[in-house]
Image (tube, coloured by chain):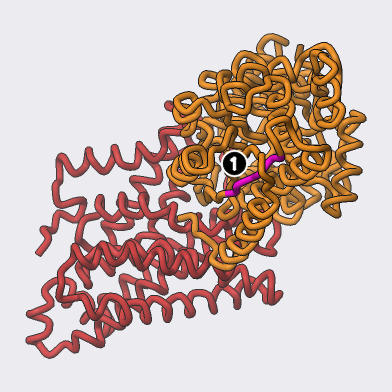
Amino acid sequence: MTLLAQYFVTGIVTGCFLILATIGFSLTRRVEGFLNIAHAELLGVSAFVTWGLNVKAAWPFLPSAIFAIIFTAVVGLVVGRLFYDPIRKLGPAVLLISSVGVAYVIGGSVDALVGTGIRTLNIPLATTYRFFGVRITDYQMIVVALAALTGLSLAVFMSKTKIGLAIGAMADNPELAASRGIDILQTSRATWLLSSGLAGLAGVVLALIATLSTDLAFHQILQILAVAILAGLGSLYSVMLAGLIVGIAMDMSVFWIPAGYRPLIAFAVVILVLLVRPEGLSGRKSK
Amino acid sequence: MKNVKKRSMLLNAALMSTALASGTLSASAQEVTVGVLVPLTGELGEFGKIVANAIQLGVAEINAAGGTSCGDIRTVIADTGGSPETGIREASKMIESEGAVAVLGPTSGVMVALVDLAKRSKTVIMSPYAGTITLNELGGDYVYRTVSSDLGDGAASGLWLKDQGYESVAFLVQNEESTISPAQVARTTLEDAGIELTDFVVYNPGQPSYQAELISVLSHEPDAIYLAGGQESGVTVIKEATAGGFEGEWLFTADLAVPEIFDAAGADLLNGRAYVEFADADNSLDEYKAFEALHIEKAGGEPGPFAANSFDMINLIALSLEASGQCSGEGINSVIRNVADGEFAVSTFADGKAAVAAGEDINYEGASGPLVFDESGTVAGAYTIQAAEGGEWVNTKFYPASSFE
């Protein structure tokens, strides 16, 4: 029973990482209307900036992380203006395919700057705590806390601030939003900054728990897609629920079936849910 | 997402063109062509350069000894970048346009892709580092390697785990053919020895965390964990297992046999409790020492990984040309097994050439080992176990090829 509880707790942590990795991706998808495959590479940008400052420049972890998040947000904004704005009118399919190209450009640049091999941050080994026999490390608790905090603050931001409300309105109906006097361009820029900043946060978490290689970030894209599709086009709560479902299902499955099938479980869950709810958890139809 | 590094590509293009030019210019009236097909760019580029240089070193020695009866050896070099498609294209060019009698140096994937071409065009292909078990089925006729199969690593790992006297061992194995097959061999050794196998977990690399995979492993508190994985997954697993309370010992496979592991995982997690297993040349052999001295003198430096195996390839080809009296791949293929395993031991081309002229049935004893091809054209290998001590890998045990008979 303790073993099963251990899988459950590990699943929550996996789910929380997926929430952090997907929340910005999902935001772009709602507001800009396409699946930005390059989002995963932004995690890599942030992870390696954190590593560069922490290890190469010997900065403490926290300032390295904060700088990495801001830097990634700006990179995301520039990428949005440079690559996506000019082709926005060509529709989501063209944007999606272009984003694969953008992923290669970002990935290639990181590769060229960082080089091959593995990298780890200059931080202490995780400390393990036990609650009723179930293990959890301090870094795992940070992941859970960050996911919860991000979800909460994003909810407040989207419902209480002017720019948050504008983003929500544009996600629901861009034409209507424009006719009501919302500055589409400014809102779009704000979305890019926000979603890329969230990718930056996920990248920091990646650097915190994982061993970095230049292709690690892109490896996360399939699970990000799984969570985003499961969530559907709805609110950020559906992303949080979807992340937890996929994370817990993947990790608990290891109790019964070989671990090599974890990615398969992620997509099996997505397919099963979509059979019952074709619009995803949020139930909202695409425009 | 593997990216080609432009700068090293340019550099290699320059290196290659000089190599090609020197190869072509040194051609005398009568000559025999050997293709050198290696990755000069991409992930395995560093290995490809070592192999190409060791072959050139062998060619220089052979030609200095008067060349073969088919004339001096001329090499043509091409870069595969590790890609089987490029490999097939370049090998076809070497065989059809350049008349190569043998193609040396392809990596595992390229070797497998070339099997059909080799048999169809009756051209010998040989690799100094392709460990893939696919060649255990496909190799043997026109397809050879001067390195042991990946399965040999499993046998060596199994032997070490047994010799250490562990009572329980858990296996964590990356989801790839090259790691799963040796792990299964090691597992059989353990089961035969009555050692408890607590877990056999096959995991996918590229994950931020491997906590889910470790839960069952840690709950069984094994004496040792056999970890067959890449550096990225390996380091995360080492850290997470240690943080999770694992206090036993480790046995890693070759990918982790690099100094970077101590920086990445933390030397204090490894010192005194981690070991690594990898295929290695038998440095105690006189043939190896002679090669090492030659390499230091002519190439300026210690031989790199697979240099001895590469040097042996070109010597085997040259001696087979000599022994068969035919200047063709078919001729090489018909005698190469005998040349590697005859009666009269020789360790240099010059000695072998003289012995063949005297009518001897030669046995080439290579720099990398005794070189006896089994049915699949594979040689038995030797293996080294290193221990983590004071933040570096230190030799602790050597298993010569004879340990596995």
Classify the position of the C terminus of chain B by image quarter: top right
Along the viewing direction, whichever of A88 and B374 lies nearer the viewer: B374
**Residue that carries the numbered disc 1 in the rendered image:** B35
Q: Colour of chain B?
A: orange
Neighbor class of circle 1 (other Cα within 10 Å; few <14, some 14-19, many 20+) is many
Position in image of residue B171 (x %, y %) = 62, 28
* Chain label for disc 1: B
Q: Compared with residue A128, is residue B154 higher up or lower down, i.e. above or below?
A: above
For residue B154, side relative to residue A226 (left or right): right
Query: What are the residue bounds of the magenta stretch?
Result: B72-77
Which chain is drawn using red? Answer: A
Occupied quadrant, residue B318? top right
For residue B346, side relative to residue B248 (left or right): right
SS majority, magenta? strand
Residue A166 visible in the displayed image: yes
Q: What residue is drawn where x is 72% and y is 50%? A: B261
Along the viewing direction, whichever of B143 and B335 lies nearer the viewer: B335
